[in-house]
Amino acid sequence: MKSINVMLLCLGLAGVAAFAQKVHYDYDRSANFYAYRTYQWVGPKEVPAGEQLLDQDIKRAVDAQLAGKGLRRVESGGDLFISYQGAISQEKEYDILRSGPGPGWWGDGQITSSTVEVGKLVIELFDAATRELVWRGSAEKALDIKKDPDKNYRNLEKAVAKLLKNYPPGRKS
């Protein structure tokens, strides 16, 4: 079940058009981000079979963004350690359908509700020498699992680009 949830998270990060992507980040204000030149991925050594393609897609999207910022991926000895996490939550969405003027301020109408799955991707960067967290960002978006894999990957790329737009902090993109 966990692998299905994580897959849904990343495949639909850009999801339903009505939901804007929410991006948040924070960072260590004493860190010298311009001293970091390389990074390495950390986390589980083996990814479950059902999550391997998704893991590759997330890393590929992040790698492309960080390369554009002058960071180089290495297998060991990086200046930064990087990891990611994913999660899915369910939220209620309410729609009010008005059928025209009627009694009261709202008139005649009907309220409907639906459950929307919201995926969250968190990326964390740690200083390799101190093992301290120096940057953390999260992107959140409603999911739409009915999209084709290529479109889902393009949406993942957009989400990661928006998320890492604020790295390094203080840089005007």
Image (cartoon, rainbow, N blue to C red):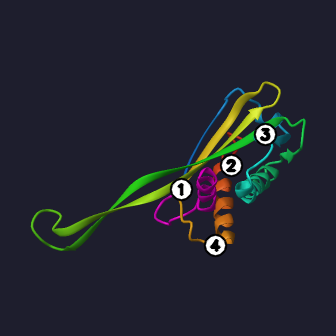
Q: Is residue 10 left or right of residue 90?
A: right
Quarter of the figure with residue 4: bottom right
Q: Is residue 54 left or right of residue 38?
A: left
Label 4 to label 2, Cα distance in Å?
24 Å
- Residue where numbered disc 1 is placed: 141
Mark 1 or 3, nearer chain start: 3
* Element class at badge 2: helix
- Residue where numbered disc 4 is placed: 148
Mark 1 or 2, nearer chain start: 1
Q: For the residue carrying disc 1, how many other residues have a C-alpha within 10 Å: few (<14), some (14-19), or many (20+)?
A: many
Label 1 to label 2, Cα distance in Å?
15 Å
Q: Is residue 161 above or below residue 71?
A: below
Label 1 to label 3, Cα distance in Å?
25 Å
Residue at the (86%, 46%) spot, across then down: 73
Mark 4 or 2, nearer chain start: 4
Estimate the x, y position of residue 171 in percent, counting from the top left. Answer: 70, 43
| Mark 3–mark 2 CB contact (< 8 Å) | no
- The amino acid sitting under disc 3 is Val
Label 3 to label 2, Cα distance in Å?
18 Å
Q: Is residue 46 left or right of residue 119?
A: right
**Is 18 in front, or is 172?**
18
Residue 11 in magenta stretch:
yes
Residue 42 got which mark? 3
- Residue where numbered disc 2 is placed: 164
Q: Which residues are magenta?
A: 1-20
Q: Is residue 147 above or below residue 5?
A: below
- Of all residues shown, which one is farthest toward the left? 103
Label 4 to label 3, Cα distance in Å?
29 Å
Q: For the residue carrying disc 4, how many other residues have a C-alpha within 10 Å: few (<14), some (14-19), or many (20+)?
A: few
Residue at the (74%, 58%) spot, across then down: 57
- The amino acid sitting under disc 1 is Lys
In this view, the mark in front (1 or 2): 1
